[in-house]
Image (cartoon, rainbow, N blue to C red):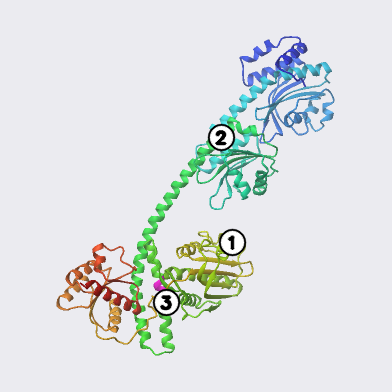
Amino acid sequence: MVVGDESEIREEFVRAMGQQPEPFVEATIANTGQHVLDWLVTHLGQMLEVHEVFVGEISGADWDRVHMLALAVDGAKAEVMDYDLRGTPCCAVVQKQEVCIHRSDVARLFPEDELLAQTGAQSYAGVPLVDTAGRPLGLLAVMHTQAFTPEQAERVATTLEFWRPRVHAELRMRRAEQDLLRVVSVPAPTGTPTLASLCTSLSHAMNVRAVFVAEREIRDGDFVTKAFSIDGEAALPARLAKSAEICAQLTTDASVVCDQEPLRQLLRSGLSASLPFSPEGFLGLRLRGSASRCHAYLGLVHDRSIALGMATSPVLRSFAQRLRGELARQHLEEERMQMERELLQASTRESLGTLASGIAHDFNNLLVNILGNTELLRAELPPGTAHDYADEAHRAAEQAALLCRRILDYASHGSRGSEPVDLARLTHDVAQLTCSGQPVAADIQLDPSSEIMVDGDPAGLSHLIMNLVKNALEAAAMTQGAVRVSVRSEQLDRPRIRAADVGAERAPGLYACVNIEDEGPGMDQDTRSHIFDAFYTTKPGGHGLGLAALEEITERHRAVLMLRTEPGEGTCFTLAVPLSEARRAQATRSTPVPARGVDRGRALVVDDQDMVARVAKRMLERLGFEVVVASDGESALVETESRDFELALIDLSMPGMPGDTLAIELRRRFPKLPIVLSSGFSDAADLPDEARTCIDAVLPKPYGYADIVGVVERAVTSNETSSVP
């Protein structure tokens, strides 16, 4: 190999060739591209008097093949070809990037090279052509059918070294044109396929075996490939292994990372199943587009080391800019689609809410009749089987009432306020009703008469416990096991709460703990890690929000949900709700129905539903009122013209004159009349201000005797207090 500066190479050329180089250089200045390459190999073949001269370009994603750009045989232009580098003298030139000269016996030294055997070559000389980033572009080589003399070898080496910069410039220009064409030829944005096309083009342009674009998901911190290309072909996306050390490096301010050991670990662990080679070189470039919500990276992977200088390649930077734009476009598209989904969900929710509200209203009217009549029936029946039947029917109606409240909560896009709840009684009733008729042995280990009070929404807590019990029953049925339900007060310390699946940030203290344990198959770690994902289910044909909906109820009650499970060992859910400050329930559903009370005057019941009006009349008569029933607002006003009333119970939703309008008119006519408004909701927050000031109490539907007793007393007391001068 001739080594030296430009002047030394020129002197060697003059000495070896016996002439000045200027005429040859001038002949190539006016020409570029394929023409100059053809001219060069032809004139080099004639000048050096050798059998073959060729310029080859590296092709494919690796360095194992060469595509001849120009070939001269015996000084004349010949047809080019492609050939495999393995087992050829060109391999050392390209892969080792070394000048290679074999003066004789080259065919014997490389017996696998069919081209040498076909041409009968005895000698060989080649010089590598590389770019500024150290990537191989190709080679300029000479083969001859006779051995080189020392003088010939020196002359050939000098000539190849002299012309290497010119050929190198042509190949760099050719490669730049190809790279530019690849960038601009990627199709218009159409989603993920465009990212894949860019990755594939980039792998060809940079001569690396794999290219991927990955984003770090906020939810679990994993890097997930948005597009992946291996050996020039689009590949399926992959989830890269999560590692705190690796993620810390990839989320630093450094824009380029190259050949760091943690990154190789990331690739080997996350891509080992996807890559058909062992990754040895890695170049990572942060994509600083509009993806502020997550970190995005462009990764280049190769089976050999990658020079850090490649990061400054204009081609790489151009592709990176295009990828940034495409990622930003995709994020905007995802946000637009998310907004459309949210609008559609809002519209659907509103429609379903309207439908649900109407259904719940009709059911509430039916349940008022069932709850009221079963309470009155229990009061009339002596202890025994018939009384037990009535009691069970009443408890079922209470659960149906809670379900209606859940439907109305959905319809109103909210939830009811907090109220004292006897969690022991609620759990007993829900578990007994849910387990009834099931083929699974259920052991409900609690006494419904023992109070364990919490503050919460009874409908929400009932829904949560019912679903946990149903899941336990289904799991136990798979192994013919049993289900155990228990409630107890327990002091939870900080370590136990921190280990919880939901509510790990709660403060230690005294909690009411509902334990629901099954002898089912249990869960493995993968299943456990996904149970609170929306729509996740292990049930065949399962659907719905699953435990994700229960997580929301748990959070709303500032409760804790703990899970203990192992494969083959069953599952135990523990719901821990903070104990109430109150020592006894304020709920009056357990209030016994007394015998008929003393005369309390006349009450006006206004309801367009005859069955509701009848049961309300019976319950008020039991309280000692003489009851007058009206089916609408106009009829009610007519009744008040000829009689005095000590109480008015008005339904809010009536045709004609609504209940709130009737309340305003009654208050105007009778300032001291206690007025109770019956509604499907627990308060009158949505009523006009004028109507709210006219109402002494609200009676939520569905209601029973115990409810009506408490509300009537509050209404009378409130009216008497407001009437005091």
The amino acid type found where label 3 is placed reads Arg
Prevalent SS, magenta region: helix
Q: Which mark is residue 584?
A: 3
Residue 586, how many percent across, how many down? 38, 75
Q: Which residue is mark 2?
A: 319
Residue furthest out toward the top: 19
Q: Which residue is mark 1?
A: 527
Q: SS of the residue at dot 3?
A: loop
Residue furthest out toward the left: 642
- Name the residue nearer the viewer: 73 or 11: 11
Label 2 to label 3, Cα distance in Å? 70 Å
Give the vertical position of 687 relative to 27 (above or below): below
Q: Magenta residues, as a range?
A: 396-402
Give the vertical position of 162 relative to 435 (above or below): above
Q: SS of the residue at dot 1?
A: helix
Q: SS of the residue at dot 2?
A: helix
Q: Earlier in the sequence, mark 1 or mark 3?
A: 1
Crowd class of label 3 (few under 14; some 14 to 19; many from 20; radius 10 Å): some
Horizontal side of residue 62 vs 651, given as left or right: right
Residue occupying image coordinates x 53% and y 62%: 504
Residue 487, how many percent across, how many down? 51, 75
Give the vertical position of 353 relative to 303 (above or below): below
Give the vertical position of 106 relative to 486 (above or below): above
Q: Earlier in the sequence, mark 1 or mark 2?
A: 2
Crowd class of label 2 (few under 14; some 14 to 19; many from 20; radius 10 Å): many
Let me know if residue 401 is in the magenta part.
yes
- Name the residue nearer the viewer: 72 or 606: 606
